């Protein structure tokens, strides 16, 4: 039976009118060379609220022509040295000023993020409140980073500097519009690069607003540009022959295309792609903490995040009890108006995403799974929300590793649950995936936690926790989950390249063509 539990989950009530004041413009163009750019003849698209389907604003649909202009502005600013040659102390000061300005506008940005993505305002307040830390971290990093002086045989000194790469294209998604953008912008600018960013057409507003913050903070014109176009815009940017690096967060199929087209120009490509994160719960786990942590790891952002815990692997001895408690927990998640402070989960982003979620729920049952909670449209919503793209937290039990719903990324509020017998079986089943982004391990045995973490084929492991992030902590995947790392010193290195300078200080005269025993190499 497809629906074993009614999906009229706890519902948040209507949003206080005071939260609905507009904090964004009714129309946006591209941001090129420090100013809004509108083509003489161009088209626009509409950004809508996925909870109510009401239009929020229109946005100029940037295409290849705007990409060319933005890349040209970025190249000119880079070659001029106005940013890359600025003393690192001054670059750091500008990033710190941008952090200060952003922090003052966090409530406004959180409100807008919630409207354009449908994510609960409590999530957006918590997430965006930390974003200035990324700017501050990389500002501090460039002030304290040092080059190296490797040993070099003979009377020579070899010093190695890290220098910016050049023009960097950044392509960001709709699920964390500001977070993922800031994770890319901060190291790119700190390193001295110039940037052209294409935000998702589903949620471009806050990134466009942030461009104005960078200008106010003192960033020179042309160093940061935004082209808010749709598919053809991303393709033009990724394949532009004057782009030196492309950094993408998106699905794995899109990532493959970007690697192919950018690789043709010998551009460096960084990518944070799909995931199917396992949450491994051993029989000695703190059950209450594991239930709460796994529920958070699964359904924050309505499950629309690449590191969402979507594979619940539970030891066979506690499987029935743990899954029952987990189902009870997630069935109580409050669904409703994202702007209401009591709402814990909002809608998915659009009709296409909702269709995909519904398809995988049906597929999971066809493949032999059992819907333990959710699996049907949400009931009891306020009239103004009934057209929204809502779907409840859904858990599918009786799953096996070969099922498509277990192996493929759903990118929505759907979790599959299945058993493992022992530590080796847990590791085998967790690693049985084309993805390798993240995982969590739940056990009170510290040695076991570290043992399992050491065997998981993923880039991020949380022990007795899930979905934690920090500007200093490397973030990225293995296998089909991408190439490269965000955050930390690794991110700064991704956005720089080394220049090795060899200095001879010996007094011996050198003439290779006269002296037969002269040193070579």
Image (cartoon, grey):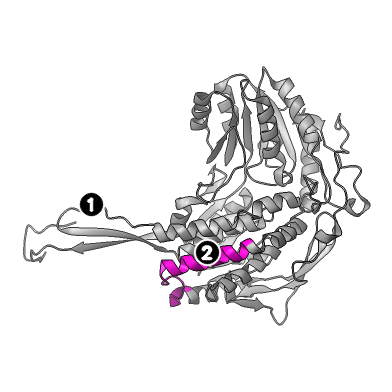
- Provide residue 474's location: percent of width, then percent of height: 50, 47
Which residue is depicted at the point 58% across and 19% down?
A: 422
For the residue carrying disc 1, how many other residues have a C-alpha within 10 Å: few (<14), some (14-19), or many (20+)? few
Q: Residue 338: within the magenta?
A: no
Looking at the picture, how far across and down is residue 164, in whole percent? 43, 64
Residue 151: mark in rendering: 1
Say left or right for 210 vs 85: right
Q: Residue 28: percent from the left, percent from the top?
A: 72, 72
Q: Residue 361, relative to residue 234: is it above or below? A: above
User: Tag 2: Cα neighbours inside 10 Å, few (<14), some, or many (≥20)?
Assistant: many
Q: Which mark is residue 453?
A: none
Q: Residue under circle 2? A: 96
What secondary structure characterizes most of the magenta part?
Answer: helix
For marks 1 and 2, the one nearer the N-term is: 2
The reply to whether the magenta stretch includes residue 100 is: yes
Q: Judge whether 73 appears above or below 92 on screen.
A: below
Q: Nearer the viewer, residue 286 or 362?
A: 286
Q: Secondary structure at mark 1?
A: loop
Residue 132 in view (yes/no)? yes
Q: Which residues are magenta?
A: 78-103
Please identify the quadrant where the C terminus is shown. Answer: bottom left
């Amino acid at each position: 039976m497809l629906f074993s539990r009614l999906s009229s989950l706890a519902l948040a009530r209507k949003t206080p009118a005071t939260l609905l004041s507009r904090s964004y413009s009714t129309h946006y163009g591209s941001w090129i060379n420090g100013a809004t750019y509108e083509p003489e003849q161009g088209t626009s698209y509409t950004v809508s609220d996925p909870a109510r389907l009401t239009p929020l604003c229109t946005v100029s649909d940037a295409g290849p022509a705007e990409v060319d202009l933005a890349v040209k502005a970025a190249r000119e600013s880079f070659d001029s040295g106005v940013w890359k040659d600025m003393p690192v102390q001054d670059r750091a000061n500008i990033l710190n000023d941008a952090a200060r300005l952003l922090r003052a506008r966090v409530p406004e940005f959180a409100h807008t993020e919630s409207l354009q993505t449908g994510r609960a305002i409590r999530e957006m307040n918590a997430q965006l409140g930390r974003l200035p830390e990324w700017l501050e971290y990389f500002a501090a990093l460039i002030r304290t980073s040092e080059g190296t002086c490797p040993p070099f045989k003979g009377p020579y000194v070899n010093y190695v500097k890290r220098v910016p790469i050049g023009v960097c294209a950044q392509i960001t998604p709709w699920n964390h519009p500001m977070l993922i953008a800031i994770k890319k912008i901060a190291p790119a600018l700190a390193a001295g690069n110039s940037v052209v960013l294409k935000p998702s057409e589903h949620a471009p507003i806050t990134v466009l607003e942030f461009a104005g913050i960078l200008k106010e903070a003192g960033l020179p014109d042309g160093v940061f540009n935004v082209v808010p176009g749709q598919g053809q815009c991303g393709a033009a940017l990724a394949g532009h022959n004057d782009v030196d690096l492309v950094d993408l967060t998106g699905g794995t199929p899109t990532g493959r295309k970007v690697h192919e087209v950018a690789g043709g120009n010998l551009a460096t490509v960084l990518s944070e792609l799909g995931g199917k994160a396992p949450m491994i719960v051993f029989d000695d786990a703190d059950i209450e903490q594991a239930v709460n942590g796994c529920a958070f790891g699964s359904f924050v952002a309505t499950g629309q995040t690449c590191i969402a815990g979507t594979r619940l692997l539970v030891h066979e001895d506690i499987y029935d009890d743990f899954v029952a408690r987990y189902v009870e927990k997630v069935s109580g998640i409050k669904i409703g108006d994202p702007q209401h402070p009591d709402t814990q989960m909002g809608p998915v982003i659009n009709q296409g995403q909702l269709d995909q979620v519904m398809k995988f729920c049906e597929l999971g049952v066809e493949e032999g799974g059992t819907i333990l909670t959710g699996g049907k449209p949400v009931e009891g919503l306020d009239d103004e929300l009934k057209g929204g793209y809502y779907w409840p937290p859904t858990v599918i039990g009786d799953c096996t590793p070969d099922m498509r719903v277990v192996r493929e990324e759903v990118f929505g509020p759907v979790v599959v649950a299945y058993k493992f017998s022992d530590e080796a079986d847990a590791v085998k089943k967790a690693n049985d995936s084309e993805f390798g982004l993240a995982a969590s391990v739940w056990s009170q045995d510290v040695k076991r936690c570290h043992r399992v973490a050491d065997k998981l084929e993923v880039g991020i492991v949380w022990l007795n926790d899930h979905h934690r992030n920090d500007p200093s902590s490397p973030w990225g995947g293995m296998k089909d989950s991408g190439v490269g790392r965000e955050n930390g010193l690794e991110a700064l290195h991704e956005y720089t390249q080394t220049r090795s300078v060899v200095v001879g200080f010996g007094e011996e005269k050198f003439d290779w063509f006269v002296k037969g025993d002269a040193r070579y190499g």
